[in-house]
Amino acid sequence: MSLLHETDHLTHDHNFLGSGHDENARRTLWVVGLTAAMMVGEIVAGYVTGSMALLADGFHMATHAGALTVAAIAYAYAKRHSENRAFSFGTGKVGDLAGFASALVLGIVAIGIGVESIIRLLHPAEVAFMQATWIAVLGLVVNIVSAVLLSGGGHNHQHHGHGHDHDHHASSGDQHGGDNNMRSAYIHVLADALTSVLAIVALLAGRFLGWIWLDAVMGIVGSIVIARWSWSLMRDTATILLDRTDQHVAEEVREVIEAPGDAKIVDLHVWRIGPEAHAAIVGYLSKDAAIDTAEVRRRLLPVHELQHITLERVAG
């Protein structure tokens, strides 16, 4: 087979940022401010009162503040370079890169919590139950406010009717319109909220029931849950960064082009280039002269995920 000269591609800008990009960026900055303020307050109070619990929680929150700052920087960088032609397919995946880095940080935090909890389980330490409880309650309030801010920033990308059903798996990424940068920030806040809830339960049980061991057990439980969140985010962002084929969209492309029976796809590449955008390179074979690239592009119109299409007609 050889390639004919009949090729086609869209000549448009390569700005594939999500529709909620600017709003998500603003919400992330608000959460960075809240988290940083809480972090500084806990560390200062820890030094003033001599409380190790305050210091430990303050430095733990610092890791989340750092990850959230990375998310904010990613939004700003993607926006600033959205029209930069040096990026072949735009900066739509900058958020996925930030999300992957954030997932790594979250995984390290989970390991740290797990190790410290096991040490505490084997060698129980004295705990200032009521003081630590109030700290955890304050942290939980901050986390709830942050979660509300972040959860309101996503735009669900609704699928339009194509004459057949879509079978996407549900995930927390879908909740944020496919924006893995926002998803990573949200998971960091959830992780903090989870550790606060578990800590409150354990501290109250230790104070009133004498179950000192529960604090360490809750820490282990929390580390396992956070590790699972981290792995899920790392897996999803890695597949996007490695340009893994989106099978759902690829099957849809194949269906709309081949269904009439007058064309056959011989080469197909479909991958995500932004929170709400996919690119496709399609090589097709047809003996009917009427099935030119304009006709194939018309058939692809219902596949709304495609924002950048390159077509090649192959000579058999």
Image (tube, rainbow, N blue to C red):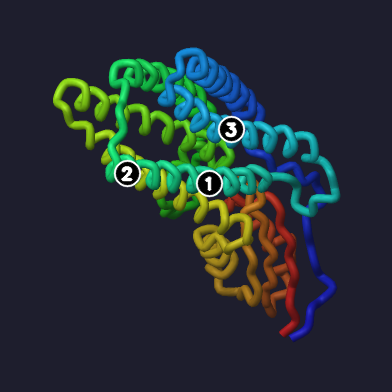
Neighbour tally class for label 1: few under 14, some 14-19, many 20 plus, Cα within 10 Å: many
Residue appearing at x 69%, y 76% in the figure: 288
Can residue 226 be seen here? The reply is yes
Say whether disc 3 or disc 2 marks the residue closer to the N-terminus.
3
Task: Specify the quadrant of the image occupied by residue 49.
Answer: top left
Q: Residue 193, how many percent across, how many down?
A: 39, 29
Q: On screen, 38 above or below 153? A: above
Image quarter of the N terminus = bottom right
Residue appearing at x 35%, y 47% in the figure: 224
Report the Cα–Cα distance between label 3 and label 1.
11 Å
Q: Residue 111, how many percent across, how many down?
A: 44, 48
Residue appearing at x 55%, y 30% in the figure: 62
At mark 2, the secondary structure is: helix
Say whether disc 2 or disc 1 marks the residue closer to the N-terminus.
1
Q: Amino acid at mark 1?
A: Ala
Report the Cα–Cα distance between label 3 and label 2.
24 Å
At mark 1, the secondary structure is: helix
Viewer-nearest of labels 3 and 2?
Answer: 2
Say which of 42 and 52 sits in front. Answer: 52
Viewer-nearest of labels 2 and 1?
Answer: 2
Q: On screen, 226 above or below 127? A: below
Which residue, given by chain and number where applicable, does mark 3 sit on? Answer: 68
Residue appearing at x 47%, y 37% in the figure: 187
Q: Amino acid at mark 2?
A: Ile
Report the Cα–Cα distance between label 2 and label 1.
19 Å
Which residue, given by chain and number where applicable, does mark 2 sit on? Answer: 220
Which residue, given by chain and number where applicable, does mark 1 sit on? Answer: 103
Task: Specify the quadrant of the image occupied by residue 131.
Answer: top left
